[in-house]
Amino acid sequence: MKISKVSHFFPQQIKKIDRFSFENDLDYQHHQRFVGTRQLHLSEMGTTGSDLALEAAKRLLRQIPKQQIDFLIFSSLTLDYKTPTTASVLHRALGLKNSCGVLDIPSGCAAFPTALALANGFFLSGSAKCILIVLGEVPSQAVDPQDPSLRNLMSDAGVAVIVEPSTNPSHFVFGNDGEGFDYLKVEQGGARFPFTEDYLKANLHKPQLNRFGTIAMDGQGILKMTLKNVPTAIHELLRLYQYDLAEIDYFLFHQGSNILLEALGRKMKVPESKMLNFLAVYGNTVSCSIPLAWYHAEKEGIFHSGDKILCMGFGVGFSWSGTILHYP
């Protein structure tokens, strides 16, 4: 399996993060060291993940006949409806053929490698030759402006990716550690915890939270879950491919935060030159982060033909998924 084309779309509003974003030098230095973002893309209130994903997909379909798309996979944590699937909405908006299947996977930060695994399964079964993966995230709209840990981290984006079969074998790893299910969550608005009158009144002047709910994150818990589970998954992935760590040209992990990437790189003994980190440019865009980083590395000429890129997503759940891609 290979990634053939990638396009993206960002909302127009850009929030610059500099010394003036913080009360003192110490807070700014802490942000630079542990978070690492220098700008965020912020969508207007009412924008959904599918809005950004749609624009990215439209750009991509200027490069390929839409009749070639055999399946559409959509990922977002802000689905348009409880039912039908948002992938169905995008299918209609893009004018795809009736024989093109659709699927939503609201898997958060682990969604992209999971989508690749699903695509690979369709290829192996012979039921698809060209698959469109679209991802759209608007996490900034679920951030309480008074939350210091998230207001300078979460960023909005849409990404579209064409994947096709290749001669290279594909393997995947997956996992979930339920002990970390509540380390990153949006509790309000689900069937178990619907919006309450008290919540709606408390956020009367934060209307975006009354649409999307509020992200609650335990950063230390996420870091603990990452270091506990992800290295084991990486070693299993290397075993499946029969590669040594040194044979991997680049490591493309979910772009969660500087401290997350640095801690994982240290534990795995990955050379800094092989760790891809574009947080400063894009922020944490949830499921969009891996394909966005892929796009950036490709645009900058970082990848070369035959490079082995280990992709690993991890976060909400606490779930993870990963694969190794060969650059065409």
Image (cartoon, rainbow, N blue to C red):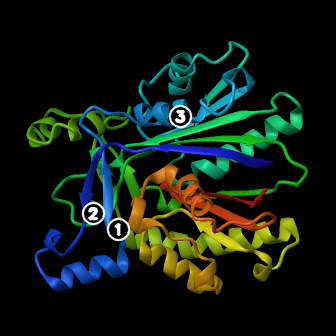
State the image coordinates of residue 275 (x, y, percent, origin top left).
59, 76
Dots 1, 2 in contact, CB < 8 A:
yes
Does 111 sit above or below residue 17? Answer: above
CA–CA distance in space, label 1 to label 2: 7 Å
According to the picture, the residue beneath numbered tag 3 turns out to be 59
Report how far apart the C-alphas of labels 3 and 2 lie in the structure.
28 Å
Label 1, residues with CA under 10 Å away: few <14, some 14-19, many ≥20: many
The amino acid sitting under disc 3 is: Arg
Q: Residue at x 46, y 40 (%)?
A: 136
Q: Which residue is mark 2?
A: 152
Tell which of 87 and 10 is nearer to you: 10
Distance from disc 3 to disc 1, alpha carbons, whole Å, reads 26 Å
Kind of residue sitting beneath label 2: Asn
On-image quarter of the C terminus: bottom right
Q: Position of residue 257 (x, y in %)?
A: 42, 69
8 to 59, vertically: above or below: below
Q: Is residue 153 left or right of residue 93?
A: left
Q: Which residue is mark 1?
A: 37
Q: Earlier in the sequence, mark 3 or mark 2?
A: 3
102 vs 35: above or below: above
